[in-house]
Structures are given as structure tokens and as C-alpha cells.
Amino acid sequence: MLKLFGFLVTNLLRRKGLQAVALVSCVCVGAFTTLSYQNFLHLQAQNISMLSVYNEIVKPLIGLVFIFQALIVAMVTSQLAPYLSVRGQHSLLLHSPLSDFKLATIFYLVSFTLSLIPLIYFCLIIVFLSSVSQLDSHFIVVVVLVLIAGAGLLSAFLNGVAIMLKNSLIALIVCLVAIGILFLIDEMMRTSTLFYSYSIFLNLMLQGREGLIVFSSLASWLIWLVFFLIGFLLLLKIKLNRWHRKYWIPLSGGVLLIVLNSITQPFSAVSSFDVSSAHLNSLSEYETGQIESLSQEINITAVIDNTKNHDEIKRALDILRQYHKKINVSFTNRQALGEQGEQVDQFVTVQIGKQQQSLRYPFDRSAKDAIAQLIIQLEGRSSQWITFIEGHEELGPFDKSNRGLSAFYQSLRELGWPVAVQNLSKQAIISNNTQVLIIAASRQNWLNQEIEAVLSYLEQGGNLVLLREDGDRIPAAINEFVGIKTLPGTLIDWHGYQSGTPHPAIVIVNDFPQHPINTGISSILAFPWSKALNITHSAGLQKFEYQAVIETHKGVWTEFDVEQSELSYDAAQGEMQASFTTAFALKNKTNQQRILVVGDSSFLSDSAINNYKNKQFALNIISWLSSQNTTDSISNYSDSYIKISPIVHFILLWGFSIIVPLGFVGLVIVLALSRQSFRKQLKRSKAI
Amino acid sequence: MDNISLNVSQLVKNIGSQQKIGELDFVIGKGAKVALLGLNGAGKSSLIRLLVGENQPTSGAIEYLTSTHTFSPTHKEFKSSLGYQADTMLSINQMCVSEYLAFCAAFKNLAHSTLPDEILDLMELWGVLEAAGTDMSKLSKGNLQKLAIAQAFLGEPKWLFFDEPCQSLDPIEQDRFNSYLKRLTNIELCVFSTHNVQHALDVADEIILIHQAKIVYQFRTKQSKDYLLCIAELNASLDHQILNKGINFEPIGYGIYRLHQPKHETIKLVDELLEQSELVNVIFLPEREALMPLFRLLASGEIELEKSEIFTARVDKEE
């Protein structure tokens, strides 16, 4: 049996057609690696977050490798029984005393073994990449196993298709068509809600590609594999004239397995195993606790134009359903939203009870992380308050004047946040359930007890939005705690004024440092009568990490007399012209405290919040401040870099696409020549 | 039954509306070498394919008998001692002669230690040793045929079937094949089809003449003293003149009769009667000599089986 296997494999390996396809597969996989590597370098140069060697280089190869595996299986199966038939060697198969099972096993193993050629080359590339990057080994093992599983399934299926055919060319064409039909059906089943659990292989491959083993997909693949194997064996029996009525039993058994599959699937649909060491397909302990404790139904609406991107959401929800079963999803596109849809980006909305919040799509992190955090945020809002301090002429949510924050308040309410206003002179305690405290430009002095209450809140790790304005009376102790001071003067943006703002004191910002608060802000922001901020050399430096969130352009200056009729930069008076920071984001180094200090309060007011992207910016601030518990658990990739050296660079550029395939060509030529010389020797020795 | 190695009963093979084999009944003795003779399209290859289990009969049964077992053509025991040369063999790409034989041995599940020597001997025996390292695709048609014959002998098979083994072989090789077959012993059965009547008579113990999917005549070649009478024309007066003269003719069917070991006087009488009848399409010869004239009659279409059957039936009735 082993000898026959060896004969078939070696003979097929000598065929020029198969050699050509194997070579093309290696060249294509190598060339794709080169392109992906170049793309990786390009993205790395752009400082893209969440960059991963696996995602950028390895993942795109998986589909390509599988396509070549399918092509090779089609070629090999058409060169087995159909080839023997067309060459009049059919009787060898027909009169073999080997049992049907053994013959089926040999044919299956031959096609399976040869289909591993692209996979072996893929593994060669992976091994090299692993030596220069920290690829997740568990992940890679699963991917390789999934590709082996795919080759196994295709070998069974195509052997069954080809066994009855009597012409190798027709068999090849039929096999290729059969592959197309198989995956068309699989894709249709996979995308259908009703037949999702019947998926033949695509579910397993796509999930495995993400480092996730879903047992239902594994079971489905296994059942289809058994079904195809039984089918192949029975067709072989027919081919060898060894068919008997009793064989209807295993055939019926195969059908029964499929039926059984459909019955058992609903029970095992959510059982899965995350193989990625970075837990890319599971939730952190905190997230698990939060989401499992939810009792309400979660409704998700994804407004995503390209249906291919639905898979990303579906896979994320498959993961989340392991922790919370009542998650519903519906998909639509912007066109379906009518005129409203034309004006907005793609987004995903999560609704829990009466609360809902949307997140722009595509996400800046994995879909699983983004949606999980959104759910946790929404869930937390019912018990976590946003509290505005009042009593010192601050901008207030219930103030209907131009200086009021009623529009901002309304937006917060729509997103489900409970909003409170607190006068610390009446009750000098800030409640524990305050998620964000907002001090919006106090114009009167504070009482000591009020200062102590805020400091106590801050000492305990409370989050704060501190809005500054010219001449405000923010207590020095609070300023000292955050370690930020305002520079003298009001910022003047003459360039902005010339571009059409009503007053030069409105600073236009259109270049944003990378920070979650600036997510989705593509156009400009306007900051009226804003102040420049600077970090003081206080204890704050040891306590916080500071990051500038808003920076002006270099033409802005600090005007000391903003009321004068003709504004001009006067360095002699001590005015400064530079790029100033008007907003700092602070992260406590020891706990999850977050603070945002903005050198402006008017951008939030009813008169300015609807200008440009101010509202988005305001909501982003709340979103960032309220998500401190989850953002730290965003899955990180260990393989975010490649240790590049001239040799590594050369190998990734030329090695796999040209040099190694050329080496294979050389090896084949050497083997062919040595075989030829062996034959000549054989002839000569016989002649003697 | 002890001396029977093959028992075929009511064997029919239809492909669509066409009858390839029609209701064959025959038995072959143990160790016999059987030649299948017939015109092109008579059904020789179809019969061989049915006998080796390559095709399934529409109805009827084929049984192979040994002293201990009875096999069907698809039985594993039968397959393991089967040697078969099909008439359609073409070369396999990227495979040389010696590799091909080893490849066939692998299909036959042969893995004994002397297999390389056996392959070497077979190559030598069938004259392909010189081409041992030659790619099959570069072999001449004759050498390819020799290779096809050689592979049939792999593993010392007991049941041998050859479908026109001598086609494409030169006269020397044909003689080599025939003399090898003649010498062949220790087999259960050897069936081969051929168009060469003389070779068949030389080699075979038994000859089966097939025409239009049916067996027209079957006889043992060795020590045959029987005579064959074939009357292709329907002639009522002849019935009375010949068949009612008290001569013991065995009706075979299709207008053919066998006269068992006739005496000299009987032969003379029949000859005279046939002469008087002025019939043209008539044969009365010893079996071995009658084959060629019978072939000519079959080829000329003078014997039409359907009509002959009616004639035979009439004779039987009168008897």
C-alpha cells in the first residue's frame, strides 16, 4: 500500500503540469509575501496603530495558499483514476486485490500529500517571519491546521468528483467547476442565518484565521469530511463494480450525519476556544464580568455599506455571544438611510434598553474590542453620572443663554448619560458614582470645603474635565493638582480670521495629534477666546502622563489686550507667537484616572457647539474619560514589528518570490538529469 | 464439477438496446487454455471484460471454481491471482519500463522480497530488458504490447486473460508468446482472444467461436476426431436426405451439427449426399479444418443466426 502511494506521488511529482502549478504557487505566495511586506513597511512608516505582521503579511497569504491547494488537489485527482482510464490502465485499478478502502485511502492520501506543497512553502515563510518577529505561535499552528483541514476536505470531495470520470482533462475542468460550486454553496450557507451552521469549511477557515476555534464549525467540517469520504468510497465501489445494496447503509449514515449536524449545531454554536496568546478572540476578566452581568437584550445596528465587512461584525458578535447570548444584529447601509445617510460616516450603534450609542466604522481597534467597550460604556452609564459643578457662575447645562451648555446636555441625555448639577457649597461631597466631573470656567471664588471636596474626589482617582477661560477663578490647588497653567493672554488666530471666522480670537485647529479624543474628527475645530496651556513643574509631572490633544498652528499669538480695535502681535509686551497647546489629556500613572484640561470653555457653549466638529469633540472627551476601565484591555499584537536587517529585507523582497523558487527549479532539473543518467546507466549495464 | 474451473450460465450483457453478449452457457475445464475466436465485433473483448469483472453482466452468472472455493469475478481471492492484459493499454507519462512493472506490482499488492528479480526475469522473458530504463512514452507499439503481456504474469497468476495479445507483435514475438503459453502449466485457466486460427489451434486446449454475441461452436482441439457439418441454407429436402439417414448428428444450433467420431463410411455417405444436394454454402470437415471455412461463411453473412435458429428448431422438432 505504501509502495503504491510512493509510486503515485513520485510519478505525479515528475509531471510537468504539476511541477508548473507547484512552482507558480510558490512564486505567487512569495510575491504576495513581498507585496505584503512592502505594505507593512509603508504602514509602519505612517505610525499606524494596531499594526501586526500576522494581519498584514500572513493573513492575506492564507486564502492564496488555500486556492493553490485546491488547484493542486483538482490537478492530482484528475491525474489519478481519470488518467488511468484514459491511458487504458483502468484495469490496474479495477483488478487490484487491494480493498476499496485501501485504494480510497491511497488516492486520498496522494492528493492530500501533494496539496501540502503550497502549505509547506507557506510554513517556510512563516518560520522565517517568526525568526524576525514575535508571531503568535498558537495562532500559526491553528492556521496551518486549518489549511490542512481544508486540504483534507477538498481531497475527499474532489476524489469523489473525479473517480467516475474517464478523461483527465474533463476531470480537471469538472473538479474546478465543482470547487467553485462547493464554495459558492458554502458562502451562501455561511451568510444565511438559516444554514449558517451547515457551513462546509469557510467558517472554520475564517474563524481559524482569526485564531478562534469554534467547535460548531469544527464539527460541521468534520461531518462534511466524513460525508465526502463516505461518498468517495461508495463511488469507488461503483467504479470498481463492487457496489452492493448494503452500501446504502453508509450512504444513509452520511446523510444522517448532516442532519445530525443541523440538530446539534444550535447547542454548540457558541462554544469556542481562543488560541491567540493576546486573547484576540476573548474578553478580559473585567470585560467578561461586565458583559456577563448584563441582563438586558443588546441590539446592534451596523450601518456598513460593503457587505463583505459584515463578517468582521459577525465574528466579533460570535465572540461576544459566548458571554451574553441575547445579542441581536441587523445590517443596513447608508443608502437605506436616505439623505441622512449621505451626510454621515459608516457606524455601528449599540442599544441596551433605552440607551444607545454609535461608533464610527471602521474601528481603530478590533471589532470585538470596540463593541465590547461600547456595551460596557452603555451599561455603566445607568449608574455613572456626569456631574457639572455650579455655584461659581460656571457654564451650566440648564442655562439657556448663549453661554449655557443645554445643547451639550441634550446630547449627553440622548446617549443615555444621567447628568447632574452639584453645588458643593450646599453639599461638599462628590458622589462615588460620578463618572466625570466637569468644571466649566468658574468665575467666582471657591470655598475651602468645595476645594477640599474636589481634591478629595481627584485624590480618589475621579475623572475631570477642566475648562479654562480668561480671568477664571479655578482654585490654585486644583490647578496645582493637575499641573497645568494658562499662559497670559488670549489666543489670536489671524490666519483663521482671514479665512472667514467672525473674530480673530476664534482659533481654528485643523491638525490633530493622534489621540482617541480626536477620533473621527476630520474637519476643523473652533475655539473662541481660548487660552494657551502649559505644564507646570509641579508634583503633577510625577503623577500623570501628559499628552497634547489640541495644538494651534504656529501663527497664533497670545494677545494681552483682546478688546483693542486693531489686534497685532507685539513681542515687546511679552506676547508670544508659536504653536500652543489648548488641550491636554492626562492619564494617571498609578490608577485609571483621566483628566482633560481645555484652555477654552466656549467651544462647548450653545453658541459654538454646533460649529464645525465641536460637538463630536465634546462627546469624544466624555467617551474617552468614561472608558478608562476598558481601553487598557484592548488586545495588543506582539508581532507589531519586524527586526529588519539588510539580509532580512533582501530575503523578504527577493528570497521567497524569486530565489527560493529558482532553487526549486534547479533542484527539479538536477533530479531529472540524475534520473536520466541513471536510466542510461541501466541501459548500458543491461547491454553488457 | 471437480474438473471445472469456469462455469458461465445464461450470461447476457446489454448496453442500451445493443446486445453485446447474448445468453452464453459454457464450462471450461481445470487448467485449460481457451482461445476465443471470432470476427471483429463478435463479442470476444466484451466476453473477456465480463469474465474478469471489468464489466458487470446484465444477467447471468460467472463462477470460478477451485478445489476449495467458488469465486465471482469481483472476489478479492480471484483478483489476487488474476493476470490480465487489456487491449487498450497506452503509456503512462514519466514512467520507465521497470518502474511500470513495479507500479503494476504495487497495484497487485505484491511485495515479496524476490519481486525485483521477478521483474527482471519478466523483462528478459518478454524482450523488454533492453528498454528497462526507457520511458514508456518512447516505446514502440510492439514493445508496449510486450510490456502489457509481461505485467499480466506478475505474481505468478493462476487465472490468465489476454485480449488479443499478439496484436502489434512481430511474428517472432508472436511465436514466443504462443510457445510460452503452450508450455504454461500450474494455472487454473487461461483465456485469450485471437484472430489467428492456426495459433489458436496450436496453443489452445479448447476453442470457442463467437459470432454476433453468441457462441457458435466450441470444441476441444486435442485429439479431436469429430466432424463439423454446417448447412447455411434452408433446404427441406436436405433434412430428409441427410438428417433422416440414421446418422447421429448432434445439433449445435445455427445450422451447425457435430458428428461424433464418424466412421469412414459415414463420412463418405455424407460427402456424397452433400454433393448430390448441390448446396454451395455447406461445410463438412474435421473440426480443426472446418474453422477457416466456417469463418469465411460467417464473414460472408451466409449464416444469419436468427434464421439458423429457426432452422435448428425445425430439425429438433422433426427428430
Image (cartoon, coloured by chain):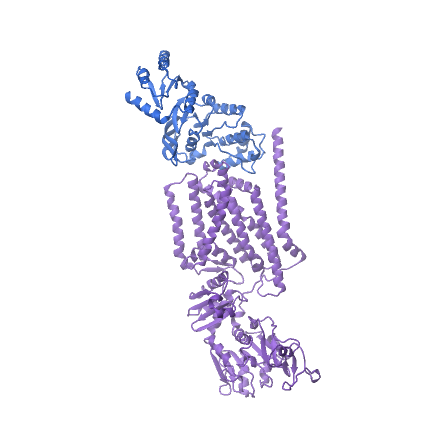
Q: Is residue A666 visible?
A: yes
How far across and how far down the image is residue B154, in percent?
50, 32
In the rendered view, tell whether residue B110 sits above or below residue A398.
Answer: above
Q: Colour of chain A?
A: purple
Q: Colour of chain B?
A: blue
Q: Quadrant of the C terminus of chain A?
A: top right
In the rendered view, tell whether residue A392 sits above or below residue A150.
Answer: below
How far across and how far down the image is residue A262, in percent?
40, 55
How far across and how far down the image is residue B69, in percent?
38, 32
Residue shown at 64% from the left, 86% from the top: A565
Q: Quadrant of residue A597?
A: bottom right
A39 left or right of A212 in image: right
How far across and how far down the image is residue B81, in percent?
45, 32
Q: Is residue B187 visible?
A: no
Q: Quadrant of residue A614?
A: bottom right
The residue most toward the right is A572
The residue most toward the left is B318
